[in-house]
Image (cartoon, helix red, strand yellow):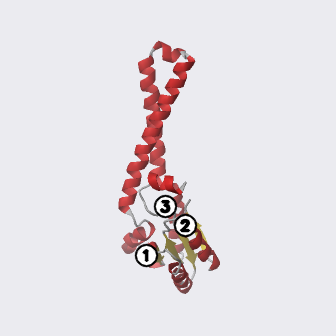
């Protein structure tokens, strides 16, 4: 499943995991523990503090939460492409099913029915691709981290690239008594 999702999304890290801490020292020690995990690269883990959520440092916060802007652009393109094609295929399949059943709508004007069904299928597929490209699971994590930073907490944000890394990071952060928030 992870392989299929990796092909649909343009980002290397599909999961984001954040541990929220009231003290900077706790966050730094947890970050060090995450960095010691096998396969985790230094760019995959970031420490974000209350000062990063303020106006002059927002680009730092944005980069810490979403470090792959070119991957996001690829995600936008790929989800729309795949969604549109899947919707068109679903519309074509629905047309074939109605045609085989002898539905009067298809029999009376087959070309218009084909255009309508494929057109609506493509439209709904593109809408689904747009929903996927917005990554609604990321919005919840970013909002929770930003809220914690405004309350003078610290966050360790990790971008694991495999499900195994994600599980290891979550285990380390849970073991440090952090409030752990993650994406799907």
For residue 111, what is the image quadrant?
top left
In primary-sequence order, the first of circles 2 and 1 is: 1
For residue 68, what is the image quadrant?
bottom left
Question: Residue 119: horizontal and vertical position, in percent?
Answer: 43, 30
**Above or below, 152 relative to 122:** below
**Above or below, 176 relative to 120:** below
Give me the disc on residue 77. Answer: none
In primary-sequence order, the first of circles 2 and 3 is: 3
In primary-sequence order, the first of circles 1 and 3 is: 3
Task: Find disc 2 in the rendering and name its residue.
Answer: 144
Q: Residue at x 46, y 64 (%)?
A: 13
**Closer to the camera: disc 1 or disc 3?**
3
Q: Quadrant of the C terminus?
A: bottom right
Q: Check if mark 1's residue and mark 3's residue have beta carbons within 8 Å.
A: no
Q: Residue at x 48, y 31 (%)?
A: 91
Task: Find disc 1 in the rendering and name its residue.
Answer: 52
Question: Residue 146: horizontal and vertical position, in percent?
Answer: 50, 69
Q: Quadrant of the N terminus?
A: bottom right
Question: Does the image show residue 126?
Answer: no
For label 1, the crowd category at 10 Å Cα-Cα, with few meaning under 14, some 14 to 19 and many 20 or more, is many
Q: Residue at x 43, y 40 (%)?
A: 84
Q: CA distance from mark 2 to mark 1?
A: 14 Å
């Amino acid at each position: 499943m992870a392989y299929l999702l990796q092909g649909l999304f343009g980002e290397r890290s599909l999961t984001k995991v954040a541990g929220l801490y009231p003290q900077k020292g706790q966050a730094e020690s947890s970050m060090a523990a995450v960095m010691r995990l096998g396969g985790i690269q230094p760019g995959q883990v970031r420490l974000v503090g209350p000062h990063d959520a303020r106006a002059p440092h927002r680009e730092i916060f944005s980069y810490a939460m979403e470090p792959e802007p070119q991957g996001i652009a690829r995600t936008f393109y790929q989800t729309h492409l795949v969604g549109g094609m899947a919707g068109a295929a679903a519309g074509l399949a629905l047309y074939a099913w109605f045609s085989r059943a002898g539905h009067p709508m298809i029999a009376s004007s087959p070309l218009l029915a084909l255009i309508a069904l494929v057109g609506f299928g493509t439209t709904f597929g593109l809408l689904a691709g747009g929903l996927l490209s917005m990554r609604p699971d990321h919005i919840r994590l970013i909002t929770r981290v930003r809220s914690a930073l405004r309350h003078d907490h610290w966050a360790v944000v990790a971008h694991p690239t495999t499900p195994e890394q994600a599980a290891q990071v979550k285990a380390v952060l849970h073991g440090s008594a952090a409030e752990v928030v993650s994406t799907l």
